[in-house]
Every structure is written in C-alpha cells, then in structure tokens.
Image (spheres, coloured by chain):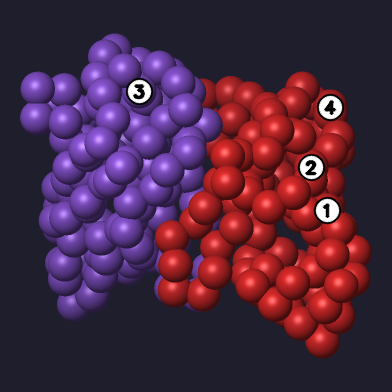
Amino acid sequence: EVQMLASGGGLVQPGGSLRLSCAASGFTFSSYAMTWVRQAPGKGLEWVASISDTGGSTSYADSLKGRLTISRDNSKSTLYLQVSSLRVEDTALYYCAKGSGAAGSRTDYWGQGTLVTVSS
Amino acid sequence: DIQMTQSPSSLSASVGDRVTITCRASQGINNYLAWYQQKSGKVPKLLIYAASTLQSGVPSRFSGSGSGADFTLTISSLQPEDVATYYCQTYSSALGTFGGGTKVEIK
C-alpha cells in the first residue's frame, strides 16, 4: 500500500524557516518524481514544487521561487521541502504526493499533509 | 505561466442528475490534464489523468473529455457520496497549475 507521512509542520514566526519531511513506503521511491502541494485554510490547491526521481531536476511555483528548496534522499525514501522567509500567507496544509512517472508534476497518491502556521 | 480556469465555482444538483464541470487552460496543453476529488477534510484523490483516462478504482460514472485548452469532467448520475470539491490540474510543463475548484452539492 502506498503511504506517505508528512511531518515537520508547526507554528513558526514570520521570517522564520521550516523543513518539511515526507517519509514514503509501499513503492519504489527512487523510481518516481515527487511533488509538494499546499492548501491554505478554506482555499484551493496550490502546486508548490516537484523533483524528479534522481533529484536531478526540480521545478518551483513562480510565486514561491527563491524561498523553497525541494530535495530527496532515495536511500531513506524521504522527500524534503525547505521553506525560508516564511510569511503569514504561507499558512497551509502541505501535502506530499507521489509522481506518476520519473519526472514531471503529474501525481497519483497523496499523503495526509502537515500543517504549517505562520504567526507572531 | 499556464492559468487554469474552472467553472462553475459551485453547483447544486439532484441525485441522479448529470453534472458537468469545465476547465479551460490559458494555452494549449494537449491532454496533460488531471482531475481530483477532495471530500471535506480529506486528502485529494486522483480521478482522471490524460484528460480522459479513469484512475483504477474510480466509478465509471465519472468521465473526462477534451483536448487542447478545453476540458470537461462529467458525473453521469450524481450520487450522495460525490459531494466534494473537484480540481483540474495541468502537468503539461514542469509547473503543475491547479484550477480554482468546483464545489458540488446535493440539492
């Protein structure tokens, strides 16, 4: 069974940084791209970033570029998202999602998400 | 960047009704389009990819069509368990833009 467990969320002050993790199981992690998607409270889905199977190719939402780093450790089947210079508007549930192929932003299975709250 | 526009933003229909949701891309995206269903408080679930391919396990009352820039998601006979918000997403480029969502309710 495909499972993804996101963690690392919490309450952080504006201007702070956070590193989110997503531990994956139930599939060959190193063979698939991975993606982060976020959802602000009561709002729609927003694609954040994607990374290819090897980590050699990354892409970021223009609105967030420069403040994000997506990475992965295939030996640990874990995906990461480093977010810096956090703003109140970054408050959201951050989902990690398994890609449908080796690269690109198409996804098929999503984890439960981790909540990031940016507030002073 | 590609923009995805869904319509309507919400709809109310009776059980058994045929429901259609539209998604329009700001430029041609071939058939690189997916549809997701998100029930209240739940994780989004993939329904359709490549514009018209049903994900395994998804009921056949769901169907997708379209190509180029205009796409539709159709529920042939609305069921109470279909109450949810539906999102389209393009994956035609490295960026994976979502539409704004369509909330479907039972009348």
Q: Secondary structure at mark 2?
A: strand
Three-letter amino acid code at the position of disc 4: Gly
Q: Earlier in the sequence, mark 1 or mark 2?
A: 2
Query: What's the distance in space between the residues labelled 4 and 1, CA to CA?
Result: 18 Å
* Separation of marks 1 and 2 at Cα, in angstroms: 6 Å
Q: Secondary structure at mark 1?
A: strand
Q: Which residue type does callout 1 highlight?
A: Thr
Mark 4 belongs to chain? B
Residue under circle 3? A32
| Chain displayed in red | B
Q: Are marks 1 and 2 on the same chain?
A: yes
| Residue annotated with mark 1 | B74
- The chain holding disc 3 is A
Residue indicated by mark 4:
B68
> How would you rate the neighbour count of disc 2 (Cα within 10 Å): few for under 14, some for 14-19, many for 20 or more?
many
Measured Cα–Cα span from mark 3 to mark 1: 30 Å
Among the 4 quarters of the image, the one containing residue A86: bottom left
The residue carrying pointer 4 sits among few (fewer than 14), some (14 to 19) or many (20 or more) residues within 10 Å by Cα, namely some
Q: What shade has chain A been given?
A: purple
Left or right: B20 as drawn, with respect to A68: right
Residue at the image point whose x is 54% and y is 69% from the top: B39
Question: Closer to the observer: label 4 or label 1?
Answer: 1
From this view, report whether residue A81 is shown above or below residue B31.
below
Give the residue type at disc 3. Answer: Tyr
Left or right: A80 with respect to B101?
Answer: left
Residue at numbered disc 2:
B64
Above or below, A117 relative to B55:
below
Question: Whole-Å distance between the Cαs marked 3 and 2?
Answer: 25 Å
- Do we see residue B39 in this rendering? yes
Discs 4 and 3 lie in a common subunit: no
The image quadrant of residue B10 is bottom right
